[in-house]
Image (cartoon, grey):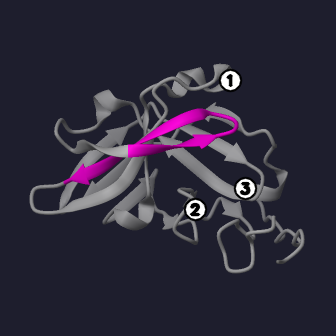
Amino acid sequence: MRGHPEPDPAGPGQESVWDYPRPPRLEPVPERLRVVFDGITLADTVRGWRVLETSHPPSYYLPPDDILPGALAPAGGGSLCEWKGRALYYDVVGPGRRAERAAWAYPRPTGAFAPLAGHIAFYAGAMEACFVGDERVTPQPGGFYGGWITRKVVGPFKGEPGTMGW
């Protein structure tokens, strides 16, 4: 188990994930968010939200009205976030491919996260591409967390090898 790391230095216009709060904070996203899967743009919005939590790159949530009909299928099961509540998972369905449990939502999030009700977050690593503005994101390391890494954020990030004890 690795102890609390030294944050990477943030340059001009960058944010350190080590300056993000715990408990997490919810904020609207001014940039356009897009998700591409199986050759099509299945989600595209300028009405997204992001969750900022210490040691994690932001997780982005898109309104269901800005996701192609039929692109999500209930996957069964769920998980519990101590801050946001119970999550449900979805398979992402394209014209010829399916990514199992590649998206999630909080149907009834806790009070501070109420604006996220029904909004969908996507695991960037399971998608063909995800974008914040015109920048293609890098998935958060590891298979559990769903943050999107852009040039705007610096780590180190939870999910990298040796970070389970953070």
Which numbered tag is attached to residue 112?
Answer: 1
Quarter containing the C terminus: bottom right
Q: Which of marks 2 and 1 is in front?
A: 1
Quarter containing the N terminus: bottom right
Which quadrant of the view contains residue 17?
A: bottom right
Residue at mark 2 to residue at mark 1: CA–CA distance: 25 Å
**Does residue 92 belong to the magenta stretch?**
yes
Residue drawn at 24 percent across, 47 percent down = 42
Which quadrant of the view contains residue 114?
A: top right
Within-10-Å neighbours for mark 3: few <14, some 14–19, many 20+: few
Q: SS for tag 1?
A: helix
What is the magenta segment's predominant secondary structure?
Answer: strand
Say above or below: 18 vs 29.
Answer: below
Q: SS for tag 2?
A: loop
| Res. 69 in view | yes
In the picture of the structure, the residue carrying the numbered disc 2 is 150
In the picture of the structure, the residue carrying the numbered disc 3 is 13
Residue at mark 1 to residue at mark 3: CA–CA distance: 27 Å
| Range of residues picked out in magenta | 77-93
Residue drawn at 54 percent across, 22 percent down = 115
Kind of residue sitting beneath label 3: Gly
Chain-order first, disc 2 or disc 3: 3
